[in-house]
Amino acid sequence: MIALFTDFGLTGPYVGQLHAVLARCAPGVPVIDLLHDVPRENIRAGAYLLPSLLAPFPASTVFLCVVDPGVGSNRRAVTVWIDGCWFVGPDNGLFHVLANRAVQVDSREILWRPSRLSASFHGRDVFAPVAAALACGTMPESCRIDLAAPPDSPWPDDLPEVIYVDGFGNAVTGVRAGSVQTGQVLRIGGQTVRHAATFSAVAPGEIFWYRNSSDLVEVAINGGSASDELGLQVGDRMEME
């Protein structure tokens, strides 16, 4: 199985071209569109989102991950074997959080290059063929390396800021819910926010935080948009009182 995790969005030709390469190079291998609206060019948000979305996938899944504002630069292309799954993408910090939390990590620089290589679309020309090869049991030419640290590291293990706003206006943070007491009060967007188990546990229009389905702290409003009500955007900080 191959899972796609990108900031491409669903408009335009980019996701379709990834699918075309994968269908040609790994015919019959299931391809799952995991997430294509990672905040644009936001490596850090992607790095904290990615670990939270892996639970449904079986061992040996290949994750093709492209949040790559440095495409065409000297940043390396890598494959990383992390706790039973492959991750393919740029060596720019996107796999940093995942690797730091892992038990087993084997990172390699991709040395293989195709005969046709766009300077601006390594997702299609490098990462997709390599992901297809791994899904078919073949390792392209590579060499072992240590992953590069993100340019603005160190990053905390849990990130107390908004990393994603979903289509309902719920604000997902980079804090794992297991690290926060359920009675703890949060402050975000100028508001004090208390915990509730789920939407139906609060009155319509009430703001609350809860453990979302990916085990992250999420700020929501029953029947409304937390993003609109509090003016929340990716990168806004959260304080735990």
Image: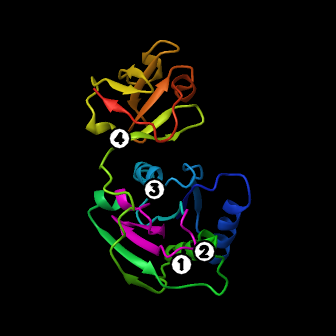
Marked residue nearer the N-terminal end (2 or 4) = 2
Q: Amino acid at mark 2?
A: Ala
Q: Say which residue appears at 56% left-offset and 25% top-offset.
A: 225
Q: Are marks 2 and 1 in contact (CB under 8 Å)?
A: yes
Say the numbered circle drawn on residue 57.
3
Question: Label 4's element?
Answer: strand
Say the numbered circle drawn on residue 175.
4
- Relative to 188, 140 lies left or right: right
How many numbered marks appear? 4
Say the numbered circle drawn on residue 133.
1
Residue 75 drawn at (x, y percent)? 47, 73
Residue 220, compared with residue 163, is above or below; it is above
- Relative to 211, 7 lies left or right: right
Crowding at mark 1 (Cα within 10 Å: few <14, some 14-19, many 20+): some
Evaluate whether residue 89 shows in this view: yes
Front: mark 3 or 4? 4
Residue assigned mark 2: 26
Question: Label 3's element?
Answer: loop
